[in-house]
Image: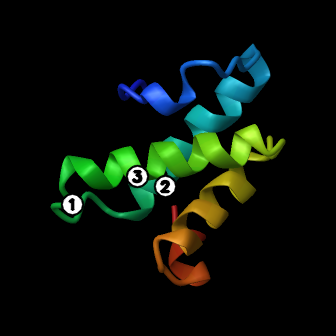
């Protein structure tokens, strides 16, 4: 999860937060079942997860679920995987 995100260059996350964000990113991407989504979708996922983490969220499941909800995906779909 290392897209070039200039907006977040002034943000620092500790190792626990990074692990949580990484797990959430992986889960969100798996939830899409690699359905031929363009790379921009992964960038949007990463930005949303980072934004939620900036607000203090550290639970990987909530990071993933909230990110997928923001993309307009159903909660049951977000819980797959």
Horizontal side of 34 relative to 8 (left or right) equals: left
| Circle 2 or circle 3, nearest the eye | 3
The residue that label 2 is drawn on is 28
Instruction: Tell me if residue 10 comes above or below residue 61 in the rendering.
Output: above
Which quarter of the rendered picture does the N terminus lie within?
A: top left
Task: Look at 84% across and 42% down and name the residue there.
Answer: 56
Marks 2 and 1 sit apart, C-alpha to C-alpha, by 12 Å
Residue 59: assigned label:
none
| Mark 3: few/some/many CA within 10 Å (<14, 14-19, 20+) | some
Q: Position of residue 68 (x, y in %)?
A: 53, 67
Local secondary structure at mark 2: helix
Instruction: Tell me if residue 19 comes above or below residue 21 in the rendering.
Output: above
Sequence-first tag of 2 and 3? 2
Horizontal side of 36 relative to 64 (left or right) equals: left
Horizontal side of 49 relative to 42 (left or right) equals: right
The residue that label 3 is drawn on is 44
Sequence-first tag of 3 and 1? 1
Local secondary structure at mark 1: loop
Horizontal side of 55 relative to 72 (left or right) equals: right
Task: Look at 42% across and 30% down and name the residue there.
Answer: 5
Check if mark 2's residue and mark 1's residue have beta carbons within 8 Å: no
Local secondary structure at mark 3: helix
Marks 2 and 3 sit apart, C-alpha to C-alpha, by 11 Å
Check if mark 2's residue and mark 3's residue have beta carbons within 8 Å: no
Instruction: Tell me if residue 22 comes above or below residue 42 in the rendering.
Output: above
The residue that label 1 is drawn on is 37
Q: Position of residue 50 (x, y in %)?
A: 60, 40
Check if mark 3's residue and mark 1's residue have beta carbons within 8 Å: no
Q: Please identify the quarter of the rendering in which residue 37 is found.
A: bottom left
Task: Look at 50% across and 32% down and name the residue there.
Answer: 7
Q: Position of residue 12 (x, y in %)?
A: 70, 17
Sequence-first tag of 2 and 1? 2
């Amino acid at each position: 999860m290392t897209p070039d995100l200039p907006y977040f260059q002034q943000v620092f996350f500790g190792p626990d937060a990074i692990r949580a964000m990484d797990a959430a990113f992986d889960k969100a991407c798996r939830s899409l079942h690699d359905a031929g989504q363009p790379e921009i979708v992964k960038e949007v996922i990463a930005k949303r997860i980072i934004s939620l983490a900036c607000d203090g969220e550290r639970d990987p499941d909530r990071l993933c679920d909230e990110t997928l909800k923001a993309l307009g995906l159903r909660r049951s779909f977000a819980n797959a995987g």
